[in-house]
Amino acid sequence: MLPRLILNADDFGITPGVNRAVEELHQADALTSATLMACGPAFDDAVRIAHENPNLGVGCHIVLLDGTPTAPANEVPTILEPGTNHLRSSLVGFLIALYTGRISTAEIEREATAQIRKLQSVGIRPTHIDTHKHTHIFPRVTSAVLRAAVACGVTAIRNPIEPAWSARIARNANRRRAEVAVLRLFERAFLAQTQIAGGEVRTTQGCLGVSATGSLDAATLKHLLEALPAGTWELVTHPGYLDEALQATRTILKSTREVELNALLAQIPPSPPTKITFADL
């Protein structure tokens, strides 16, 4: 079996500069997919781009951290930073609250459903779901977002597990490699979820580029593509233009987005791999 590759950009809708990069890369045949943030400040602009580029697979980038909820705040109080109307900013704090019973998984499902439904309300049929900071690898979140996906008719989800061979390719990424190693601890539980194990919700064999987040330059991308084995994989990227809107966000991925943009343009992968979207799974 020849390798098949989904080339996905996260954070579609966060800024106009990220949206412009997504559109340019898709039109250059360097991206097949993007995941849209329902609560992104540049959501309307991203929706316009999605409609003007119907071959771009658009998923829902479910945000449970670092943003504002899509559901009414009074309907999801436990997922908010205490005393505010904003989502929690710390992944560690989120996980502590989740596993000490202070976050309701029903509210996670409610928020995920609201975000998916917002995309559907503007005429987008999400090809898949994934989550900001890969929070859906943690079993209590996995089950909640899978219930939301199935209820909304979404039939694919990101497998956020990066194989060891891909993680080794990333340069200057010890912290990222450690994070990927932690994620890998949850692989069995993720694949054992009823919806995934039963085929109701499809996924890939894993993700590439997670360890290289923030350092995905042309050389690293070239090595990843050259090492791609048989199977179906997703390349996770964060391209964009460093505009004033991006400078004003809380994301740590700023100047590196232009590095990823240029890397993708320089390494438009030939066939193989076969470039697909989540709709082709």
Image: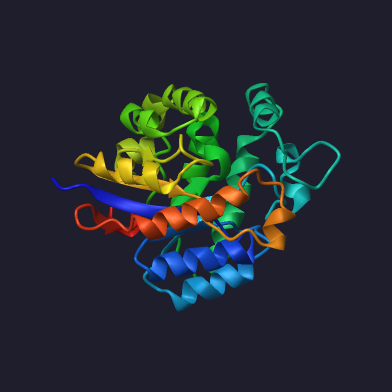
**Above or below, 223 relative to 275:** above
The number of discs equals 0
Q: Position of residue 6 (x, y in %)?
A: 34, 53
Q: Does the image show residue 143?
A: yes
Q: Residue at x 46, y 58 (%)?
A: 34
Q: Residue at x 66, y 46 (%)?
A: 251
Q: Residue at x 86, y 39 (%)?
A: 83
Q: Residue furthest bottom?
A: 52
22 with respect to 105 (left or right): left
The part of the image, by quadrant, that contains residue 56 is bottom left
Q: Position of residue 222 (x, y in %)?
A: 32, 46
116 with respect to 265 (left or right): right
* Residue in the foreground of this view, choosing between 255 and 192: 255
Q: Residue furthest left?
A: 1
**Above or below, 45 relative to 62:** below
Q: Position of residue 122 (x, y in %)?
A: 56, 72
Q: Residue furthest right?
A: 83
For the N terminus, the quadrant is top left
* Residue in the foreground of this view, choosing between 49 and 129: 49
Q: How is the image coloured?
A: rainbow
280 with respect to 92 (left or right): left
Q: Residue at x 31, y 29 (%)?
A: 165
The part of the image, by quadrant, that contains residue 89 is top right
77 with respect to 35 (left or right): right
**Above or below, 32 relative to 51:** above
Q: Does the image show residue 62?
A: no
